[in-house]
């Protein structure tokens, strides 16, 4: 992990904005072009599939209601770690993704999300990743429920909250959610250009992830032995299906 105390301002700026060691890109360009770019690709494909459906073509695929929230949550967790400078590779058991995300949302997201950062993160990220469905919540004292819904059919139809009976529905347009994330990251990166504390956090977090190498366990050691045996004396062999 980089020691930011030993780095000059120029070296910090070069690390984040000039060095192209990350797949031929700078750290910042990797965030905007790869991390966010992958999500843009999915959304572009969804737009085309919706157009095909509306023209009457045969249609059986999904619209990304599951995959896009997962991708957005992944990007949010990564950038929030850069913002706070805290990662599980640097901070170990003290690492709390939800605390990182809460700080980032409170700083850069619209007011609607600032009112419920932990509900949003737990319901959307943890729900989708662990159960492939957004979590629901109950306020036991009031017997009120909170549920999430995601839609993509009309990307210009705004996200909103509505109450039906004793359930509060948080209805999120995934296109709009991506625009919210993209705008938040853009604002963060603009501040990063001149805020040395943010630069320190970014470098400590990024380098802790980049430099981390995990020791294999017993099962993985056996698999590594298998891989080496499969290679034999060759430097490259095809993966056979």
Image (cartoon, rainbow, N blue to C red):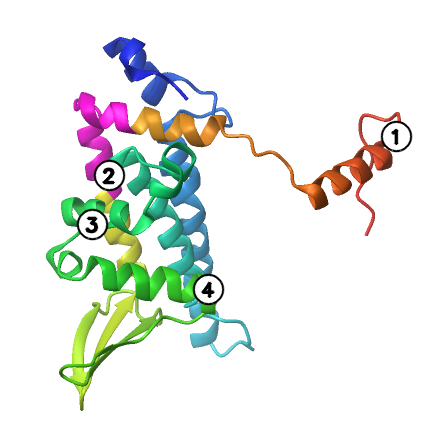
Given contact means CB atoms under 8 Å apart, are the residues at marks 3 and 1 in contact? no
Q: Secondary structure at mark 1?
A: loop
Image point 71% across, 46% down: which residue?
219
Q: Is residue 145 left or right of residue 35?
A: left
Q: What stretch of residues is rendered in magenta?
A: 185-201
Rendering quarter of residue 186 = top left
Q: Which mark is residue 130?
A: 4
Crowding at mark 2 (Cα within 10 Å: few <14, some 14-19, many 20+): some
Find numbered disc 3 in the image and state the secondary structure of the residue it sits on.
helix
Q: Rounded to the nearest whole Å, what is the CA distance between mark 3 and mark 1?
A: 50 Å
Horizontal and vertical percent position of residue 95: 34, 42
Instruction: Say what secondary structure mark 4 lies in.
Output: helix
Q: Does 75 sit above or below residue 204?
A: below
- Residue 233 colored in magenta in the image: no
Q: Which residue is mark 1?
A: 232
Compared with residue 37, is residue 19 higher up or lower down, i.e. above or below? above
Q: Which residue is mark 2?
A: 186
Residue 105 shows which numbered tag?
3
């Amino acid at each position: 992990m980089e020691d930011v105390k030993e780095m000059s301002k120029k070296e910090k700026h070069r690390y984040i904005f000039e060095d192209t060691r990350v797949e031929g890109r700078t750290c910042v360009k990797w965030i905007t072009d790869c991390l966010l770019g992958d999500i843009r690709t999915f959304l572009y494909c969804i737009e085309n599939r919706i157009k095909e459906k509306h023209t009457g073509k045969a249609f059986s695929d999904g619209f990304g209601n599951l995959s896009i929230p997962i991708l957005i949550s992944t990007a949010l967790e990564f950038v929030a770690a850069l913002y706070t400078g805290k990662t599980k590779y640097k901070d170990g058991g003290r690492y709390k993704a939800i605390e990182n995300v809460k700080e980032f949302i409170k700083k850069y997201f619209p007011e609607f999300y600032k009112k419920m950062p932990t509900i949003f993160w737990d319901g959307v990220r943890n729900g989708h990743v662990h159960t492939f469905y957004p979590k629901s919540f109950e306020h036991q004292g009031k017997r009120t429920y909170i549920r999430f819904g995601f839609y993509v059919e009309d990307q210009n139809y705004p996200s909103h909250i509505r109450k039906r009976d004793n359930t509060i529905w948080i209805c999120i347009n995934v296109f709009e959610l991506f625009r919210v994330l993209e705008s938040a990251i853009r604002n963060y990166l603009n501040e990063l250009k001149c805020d040395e504390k943010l630069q320190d956090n970014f470098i400590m977090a990024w380098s802790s992830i980049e430099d981390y190498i995990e020791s294999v366990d017993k099962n993985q050691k056996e698999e590594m032995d298998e891989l080496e045996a499969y290679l034999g004396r060759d430097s490259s062999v095809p993966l056979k299906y």
